[in-house]
């Protein structure tokens, strides 16, 4: 029992050592528009239809593809609603490529979000670059 308490205390310490992001800036490859998710705009939806904040008219992008949420003191979360997948990777496209499994918090400070196709499929218009601060 003591070992579990010790592990839990160390795990909590690891969580507190990493500073959460205060915002994420997004730039779409499709139209080069810039968007920010932060305290003032805590949620942005991305998809193919017009009622999303970021609209990417591509058949590989679902009508409501994903949502990006900011939570003060916690960080940034991406929730995937798509059929074709949402991937995230670093800015050099050299680290691991993470396929989101419906929802995931990320700690990469800058990189790309790919909608509908994995990055290995080549650069495409569904790519969104992000920078977290």
Image (cartoon, rainbow, N blue to C red):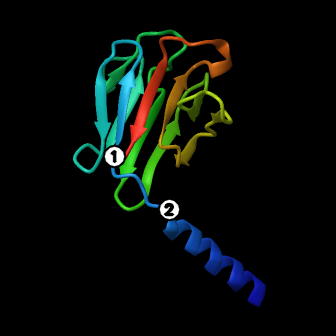
Disc 1 element: loop
> x, y (%) of residue 2?
75, 90
| 35, above or below 14, in the image | above
Q: Residue at horizontal 41%, vertical 10%?
A: 57
> x, y (%) of residue 87?
59, 30
Quadrant housing the N terminus: bottom right
Ranked by sequence position, the earlier of labels 2 and 1 is 2
Mark 1 surroundings: few (<14), some (14-19) or many (≥20) residues within 10 A = many
Nearer the observer, 58 or 126: 126
Q: Mark 2–mark 1 contact, CB under 8 Å? A: no
Q: Residue at horizontal 39%, vertical 45%?
A: 69
Mark 2 surroundings: few (<14), some (14-19) or many (≥20) residues within 10 A = few
| Tag of residue 85 | none
Nearer the observer, 64 or 110: 110
Single out the residue that lies furthest toward the left: 40
| 124, above or below 129, in the image | above
Count of residue discs:
2
| Residue 120: quadrant of the picture | top right
Q: Which residue in the protein does label 1 denote?
A: 23
| 116, above or below 7, in the image | above
Single out the residue that lies furthest toward the bottom: 2
- Left or right position of 96 against 38: right
- Left or right position of 122 against 70: right
| Tag of residue 18 | 2
| Residue 131: quadrant of the picture | top left
> x, y (%) of residue 14?
58, 68
- Left or right position of 120 against 12: right
Disc 2 element: loop
Q: Give the foreground label among 2 and 1.
A: 2
> x, y (%) of residue 22?
34, 52
Mark 2 and mark 1: span between their CA atoms? 15 Å
């Amino acid at each position: 029992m003591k070992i579990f308490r010790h592990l839990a205390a160390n795990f909590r310490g690891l969580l507190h050592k990493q500073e959460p992001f205060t915002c994420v800036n997004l730039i779409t490859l499709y139209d080069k528009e810039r968007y920010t998710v932060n305290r003032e705009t805590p949620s942005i939806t991305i998809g193919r239809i017009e009622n999303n904040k970021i609209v990417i008219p591509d058949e590989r992008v679902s009508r409501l593809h994903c949502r990006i949420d900011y939570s003060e003191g916690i960080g940034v979360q991406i929730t995937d609603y798509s059929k074709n997948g949402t991937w995230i990777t670093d800015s050099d496209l050299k680290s691991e490529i993470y396929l989101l499994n419906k929802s995931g918090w990320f700690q990469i400070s800058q990189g790309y979000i790919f909608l509908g196709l994995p990055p290995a499929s080549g650069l495409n218009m569904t790519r969104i670059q992000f920078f977290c601060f």
